[in-house]
Image (cartoon, rainbow, N blue to C red):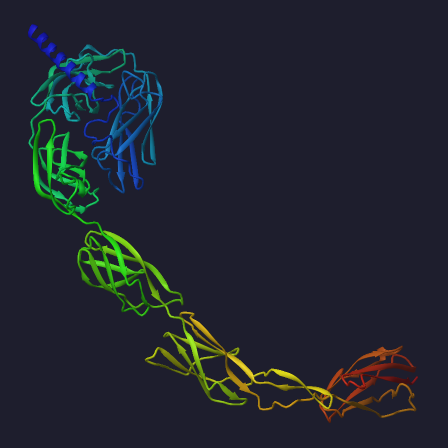
Amino acid sequence: MKAMTQQKSLKALLLAVVFVFAACKGESPTAPPPGGGTGGGNNPPTTGIAITLTASNANPVVDSPVVITAAVTVNGAAAPNGTAVEFVATGGSFSATEVVTALLRTTTNGSASVELRSTVAGVIRVQATVGNVSRTVDVTFKVSPTIPPPTSQAPSITSVSPAIGIPSGGQRITIIGRNFKEPVKVLFDTGGPLPVETLVISRTDTQLEVFTPSVNLGVGQQLVSDIIVITQAGTVNEARAELEDGFTFRLEVLTPRISTTTPNSGPVTGGTRVTIFGDGFQSPVQVLFGSAEARVVSVDFSQIVVESPSGRDTSPGGSGAVTGPVTITVRNINSQTSATMVEGFRYVAAVEVISVGPTEGPFTGGTRVTIDGIGFVAPVAVSLAGFPAQPISVTGTRLVVLASGITLTGCDDITGPTTVTNIVNGDQADGPDFVYRVPRPLVTGVNPSTLIEGSTGSVTVTVLNAQAGPVRITIGTRAVFPTGVVFNPDGTAVYTVPLPTNFDFPTEDCSIGGVDGSANEPLDLDVTYLNLQTTCTDTAAEALTIIPLDQTCQIPASPESSFVVAPTNGAGCAVPPTVTVGNTSDAIVTFTNSGGAPLTVDASTITGPNADEFTILPSTRVIAPGASASFTITFTPTAAGAKNASVSFATNDPDEGAVILCIQATANP
């Protein structure tokens, strides 16, 4: 018994030292569980996140622990170790000794866990958040039954496997025994003021799986702990089993060894995520690239993930060459053991385009362009204004490329950046803009430039900077299409186009003998070139002149009307002239045009007391010069007796104007 007491005293003393050391380090009871990475967790991803949130027991007894586990994937793969997961409980607590309703945990192998408790019955909602994605799970705490267990149901511990583990905790161990009734608590008594409760992963009546807690130990030290199992915790049937000295924490002295790194190169700007493979790695570790310390992302026994420092920091003075190989050193801080890999990482220059010359060329391609910069690694891909160029020579600081010809879809110059891409590692940089020049077309000549009215055949239109493709030529307002084209070495194209006919000539005022007239003038026509594919166009103003055959002064002719009434059945009336219509015969009125212009006669208007008994056809006549035309008047009486009406013949005769005739008829009884 004394020996046991001494042993407990030693354990208590050792724990006191451990707690003092932890306080100096500023550790928090809400710190992430072991294996969760370093530096408080990675920044969470922002896209492709999925969370599966589960509870080890959805209906636990009050005051019993429930393990809440968040399984996190990013784009279908387990989230990187150290990804931050925020747990928030509505009601309940994440601690057995104080009210803690929010905890930050980091993932290990894609999952993170917390332990939930409640001192009262009811539903507790737990939310887990990663980046902008959240999931919830409900746990219903209930009051345990009050039936006491039979004496034969008392728990007992038979063995623990493994019985030795690392002081950093997070090790999965199995406790063998019997009567492990829910809810179950497992505590490690290391001789301190209070036992440390740990996380129960799974339970059967004869077996428990738990994670070991973490303790602080120096190199070569060990700490022996009792294991306590409390069954039916928080109920009137609560029972306790203890295995004295059931587990030993031991800090082994590990010597690291580096086997390989991937990737083994990166840009001088740093920030490359490098995985160091080997064995004997023991957290905390220090990783150096040359003399610069890398940021450690995660550590386990066989691999370390770090971010490379800037190449400029790798030399002792922080200056000098920033490219080339550096030695990687891994140091286990606790044991002060280390390993190195000579030329474990190579810094390469990041791609940068400094200058480009020339910065423009014709759209037909063929321009030889020199690109100066750093970090060019063959094979490279180069584009000018978005169009691929052909590399001719490649060095680390200079490229020479040949601009490709491009197919035009418009008439504007095409401008865009000069882009260089290292095909192997994907490094890319943009430089000054390159401009593909698109020369504007110019109509330089039309041959012949003067034609006589009535000429037939074709003319040629000469265009500078014409482009291949369908072309339309417009002469005045008449669109014509070339029947042939010849491209000359001087950059001109000669199009042959048919000549339109039947032009409307402009006129100028003139007079003969005091009578006003007009005379035709020469017609000046614009000639327009249009490339239908690129829409490039140019117009030569008044480039073609058509001379009218007749340019004499023309006096316009006027119509002149005269009329004859036949037959004349009766004496008629003197003013106005009268036409008599019989019961069965028609009256004919004939107009003759004795002038020099067409005569228009409109006889559509009949008025008078009996207008509705007379009709006249046709209603209108157009009479050519020297010709005659007749109108027929028909009488259709509705009752016996004398009838009369009048008809107005409207004419365009400037002297005669309108002619009004009386119509009279007698209807027989």
Instruction: Tell me where residue 530 sits by quadrant.
Output: bottom left
Q: Is residue 656 above or below residue 108?
A: below
Q: Is residue 224 above or below residue 370?
A: above
Residue 192 at x, y percent in the picture: 17, 13
Instruction: Tell me where residue 632 sits by quadrant.
Output: bottom right
Residue 206 at x, y percent in the picture: 16, 21
Which residue is at 29% across, 34% downward? 52
Looking at the picture, tell me which residue is in the foreground, 351 or 215.
351
Asked whether, in this view, residue 285 is left or right of residue 131, the answer is left
Asked whether, in this view, residue 596 is left or right of residue 39, the answer is right
Instruction: Tell me where residue 209 sits by quadrant.
Output: top left
Report if residue 575 is visible in the image.
Answer: yes
Q: Is residue 296 above or below residue 326?
A: above
Residue 41 at x, y percent in the picture: 24, 32
Q: Is residue 196 above or below residue 478?
A: above
Query: Which quadrant, please, contains the N terminus?
Result: top left
Residue 231 at x, y percent in the picture: 22, 16
Report if residue 257 is visible in the image.
Answer: no
Looking at the picture, tell me which residue is in the foreground, 269 or 177.
269
Which residue is at 88% across, 87% downward? 577
Which residue is at 14% across, 40% downward? 315
